[in-house]
Image (cartoon, grey):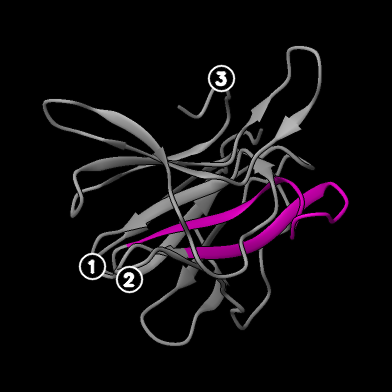
């Protein structure tokens, strides 16, 4: 099993009837970050396994914003706190990655056009299937109260979502 951890990304992979978790941290005596992907198969005999993935993985991190794209069958993650690539220094991240779940799971870092949101951890995100976009809000560095979107209907592109009325408190 993945062992104790918190602040990880978790999705339900409907095609393979399993729950996937990515990253997270464990810190009772030492600060440990992860970039592993674990799968919990569902059914009569649930079991954990470390998912074998291809491609260059994102660095270890906790508290990313994440979403599941059921049409393209992929996990999307944005930011968090940790390393951009394994071995890099710790920082608030604003990178975006996809883990394709078709065939052999494969990591790919996306390189969208436009201005990305600032690096952050936590916040909230969801994948909008109808508009083929990954939408996020807030986070905990500099208390951003912005809402952003990553359009994935063609070439990936960042943009800010404009809203009316007073913004909610960040954090």
- Dot in front, 3 or 2: 3
Of 4 and 168, which appears nearest the observer? 4
Q: Quadrant of residue 153?
A: bottom left
Mark 3–mark 1 distance (CA, rounded to whole Å): 31 Å
Magenta residue span: 74-98
* Residue highlighted by disc 2: 132
Answer with mark 3 or mark 1, whichever residue precedes in sequence: 3
Answer with mark 1 or mark 2, whichever residue precedes in sequence: 1
Tag 1, which secondary structure?
loop
Q: Quadrant of residue 18?
A: top left
The residue at the point 80 percent across, 13 percent down is: 29
Bin the neighbour count of mark 1 within 10 Å (Cα to Cα): few under 14, some 14-19, many 20 and up.
Answer: few
- Rendering coords of residue 131 (x, y %): 30, 70
- Asked whether the viewer can see residue 161, the reply is no
Report the side of 92 relative to 165 (left or right): right
* Residue highlighted by disc 1: 71
Tag 3, which secondary structure?
loop
Indicate which disc residue 26 carries.
Answer: none
Mark 1–mark 2 distance (CA, rounded to whole Å): 9 Å
Bin the neighbour count of mark 3 within 10 Å (Cα to Cα): few under 14, some 14-19, many 20 and up.
Answer: few
- Rendering coords of residue 139 (x, y %): 64, 41
Whether label 1 touches label 2, CB < 8 Å: yes
């Amino acid at each position: 099993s993945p062992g104790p951890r918190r602040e990880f990304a978790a999705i339900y992979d409907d095609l393979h009837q399993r729950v996937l978790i990515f990253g997270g941290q464990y810190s009772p005596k030492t600060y440990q970050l992860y970039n592993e992907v674990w799968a919990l198969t569902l059914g009569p005999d649930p079991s954990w396994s470390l998912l074998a993935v291809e491609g260059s993985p994102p660095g270890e991190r906790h508290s990313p914003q994440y979403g599941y794209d059921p049409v393209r069958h992929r996990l999307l993650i944005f930011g968090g706190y940790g390393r951009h690539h394994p071995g890099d220094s710790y920082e608030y991240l604003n990178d975006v990655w996809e883990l394709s779940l078709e065939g052999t799971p494969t990591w790919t870092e996306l390189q969208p056009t436009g201005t990305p949101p600032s690096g952050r951890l936590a916040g909230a995100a969801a994948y909008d299937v109808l508009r083929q976009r990954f939408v996020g809000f807030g986070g905990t560095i500099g208390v951003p109260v912005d809402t952003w979107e990553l359009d994935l209907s063609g070439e990936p592109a960042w943009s800010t979502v404009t809203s009316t009325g007073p913004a909610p408190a960040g954090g």
